[in-house]
Image (tube, coloured by chain):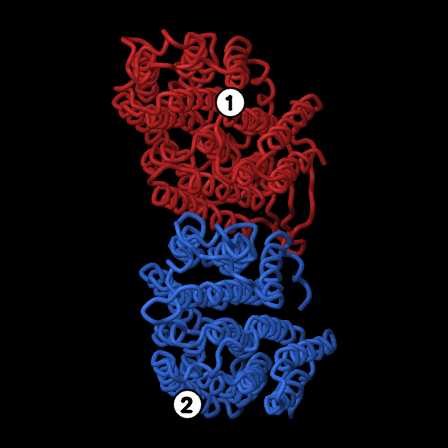
Chain colours: A blue, B red
Amino acid sequence: MYPIVLLSVLGIVTLFIGFSKSKNILLPAVLLFLAVALAGNFFEWNKGPLLYFYDMFRVDNLTLAFNGIVLISAFMIVAISGGFQDNAEAEPAEYYSLMLFSLVGAIMMVGFEHLIMLFIGVEILSVAMYVLTGSNKRNLRSNEAALKYFLMGAFATGIMLFGMTLLYGATGSFNLSAIQAYVSTTQQAVPSYLLYAGLLLLMIGMLFKVSAAPFHFWTPDVYEGAPTIFTTFMSTIVKTAGFAALYRLLSHSFTGIYDFWWLVVAIIAILTLMVGNIGATTQNSFKRMMAYSGISHAGYLLIALTALSKPTQNAIVFYSLAYSLSTIAAFGILMLVSKQRSFEGQPDERYDAFNGLAKENPFLAFVLTVAMLSLAGIPLTAGFWGKFMVFSSAAERGIIWIPAIAVLMSTVGIYYYFRVIIASYLKEGDIAKIRVAPFYQFVLVLATLLTILFGLAPGLLEGLF
Amino acid sequence: MLTLLLILLPLVAGVITLLVGANLAKQVALVGALAELGLAIFVWSQFDPAAGVQFGFKYNWLASAGISFAAGIDGISLVLVLLTAFLTPLIILSTFSHTYKNSAAFYSLILFMSAALVGVFMATDAFVFYLFFEAALIPVYFLAAVWGGENRLKVTLKFFIYTMFGSLFMLVALIYLYYQTPGTHTSEITAFYNLQLSAKSQGFVFWAFFVAFAIKMPLFPFHTWQPDTYTESPTPATMLLSGIMLKMGVYGLIRLLLPIVPLGLESWGMLAVILSVIGIIYGSIIAIQQHDMKRLIAYSSFAHVGLMAAGVFAASPNGLQGAIIQMLAHGINVVGLFFVIDIILSRTKTRSLDQLGGITQVAPQLSVYFLIILLGSVALPLTNGFVGEFLLLSSVFAFNSWLGAIAGLTIILGSVYMLRLFQMSMFGPRSKWVEGFQDLTFNEKAVLLPLVIMVLWIGIYPNTFLSISEPAVNQLLQLVAK
């Protein structure tokens, strides 16, 4: 609960710092705010479960763990944003405060106990993201992306809200526990189709946010059009929060009708995996590939959700963390490299932009390689254990055909992730030595070290929540 | 503790190699590899064949899930650990006349690779096995992709995706088996041995394992990555791939497939043996037609591994013992052959048999070493190839006499392509490419001599090595018969 209050207040403070003449204190201030929020978050560790705001918000260790991932990701993303100093038209204070506000939305999604809280969280998160997507005002693609994201997002939220009203109609409550009670008693005796319809519509809204197929069509364009730093934000924080919300919704309230929804989620998971992985193979732009890769990772997380067995909770937390770390590292390198060359008047974001990276910048190439290996799920990286836990949760439920298909798809994944490694190590290119700011370097080192650490000792996080 | 040391030593040596930089990299790497060999021999001296799994090491990895980092050595493991420890310093030494760009990375990758290989052979936990099985792929991928020939990018990516594809199926099978274990699940391989699975699910697991290991070895029809990868890789990587990494597949068959799914073997073993025998004949016939020496050896390796697999699938004591001694022999021979080809290539700048000829006249020493290793590969009595091939063929023959007879053609076909290789390169009129050919240097002799000694040692007194693995093999076969 503390981070919600802290971030709301500090977001406004950030706006005011923007009025001051000294732009240089902005970045350290925001980092400090995030660190404070992170500390505040873990202040409630092991004290839960607690309920706040008239039982609308729930704090337990799982909430705090997801919040931790969201806040650490945000910290790293802000650190590599570098205060937007290389862009004269940027409004750093506004961007940062929007980021802080959207974090409030994300945290509400993570800990909601009441459907209205979920709705508010999704809206706070999304509205801030619509603005940030279009923040590159003079760039047509950025404008297009913002409009597309907003229109599609608005529809999705509408559908989600419709689903909530149907659920309310069926159960008479927005409260998760009340819905759970209804599902496990009345629903078993007299099945209400209103409830089924409501659940499906609500899930469609949420699946849109995490870009699961067939609700993914906005993703590549929006990811590509948005400034890379906000793409990173979208692909890590929005996804983590979305999955935390889906997990809470399904595991808390709807286990009673598991037989009804599991196949729906399973089919969507398979579809998402196929669209994501096969779509990624045909891309020439690294950023678009990462968008499709984001879709495919949503597919893996959906497998864990489908199974909803004992390892699922661990799997989702671990996978989100591993995915976020690697994605931040990958986009971090892209931001450095794309500035070196331009392609069709834009920063070069194709695979070719990485050609010959390893020659003058072995450190950056190594960070990128670890990130790609982790995303591809190669052993001794965090990504491998993420996939392992996901497959385990399906196997625990006794569903083997889903991991079998997922395995095929992750072989496809190796193809496009390795294209990046091949470009940076094995292709000829002339990238001069890139100077990396200390903060930036810190984030890259941290992401890489954590990826390897969790790859070697995946047990570090278990049993905590 | 010794097992952990065997894995850590090459890792640490690899890191040190990386740190000392290009000037000293070779020497440091060689010292590291020799230290590993010394350690392996020490382990051998402490080893008691009758005592089962020894030098066990266990560290709780994912405690709540019952997954631990567990390793230990039994007779089968020890033979392969010895092979790895023996070949790695020779492979490093064989590169001394070359200068590779970025050599610190090159040598450290070789050492990382050998750490992963040793790990595979000693793992007693299924997931640790899987982890090392995959981890071995990464160094060799980079070795081949960075230092390889012209088409390396395409070829190595195909190799990587192909092998990864297979092993992911193994991962699914392992996770499935893990959830079949009683109580709070465990992933110890011995726990998998005691599962009572239905014949149907054993069939699925059988194929998941089969695909993983068949791609790695490779068996027909999963071999299409192999000739290109062997040809395009730099020679040390080819040696690692064919000399040691291929054995991971055979080892996997022995360690996982046979004892875990005996019923699967019962229903599908025939098909597996038939595929292996097809591979033997198919590989040999293609090898006869090759003009590129490296490709010829690649196909011969494909044929040899087919015979090993056939012996393993026949699941008799002779078959397993034959496969194990043949793994040892094949590793030694193929490394020797690739090294000789590398020597010829570096002096004449060609690998084509059409352009070579008459090397015996200029390099008598080379031709003697070459001949001995080559005869080992042809399986002449009193050389190392004979023991394994004899045991393997007798087991395939006992399994099915028709298949045994067909597999027996390997002896004829093998001598055809090998002697053709020797005749076209060494005898005949001296070709213009061979002018100024220098005989062996001291370094080269230092590589070839140990190999030749091993060829003769195993050929004359195979019992040194057969006795190491015999109790372990018998124990394993009891599980299959169960």
Tag 1 subunit: B
Q: How many marks?
A: 2
**A438 versus B199 height, above or below:** below
Query: What is the crowding at mark 2: few (fewer than 14 residues within 10 Å), some, or many (at least 20)?
Result: some
**A158 versus A221 height, above or below:** below
Residue type indicated by callout 1: Leu
**A378 versus A201 height, above or below:** above
In this image, A133 relative to B175: left or right? left
* A289 or A275, nearer to the observer: A289
Q: Picture quarter containing residue B426?
A: top left
* A368 or B81, nearer to the observer: A368
Q: Is residue A250 visible?
A: no
* A96 or A411, nearer to the observer: A96
Residue B233 position in % (x across, y down): 40, 35
Residue A12 position in % (x across, y down): 61, 91
Mark 2 secondary-structure assignment = helix
Residue B454 position in % (x across, y down): 53, 15
Q: Which residue is mark 2?
A: A162
Q: Is residue B158 visible?
A: yes
Q: Which residue is mark 1?
A: B328
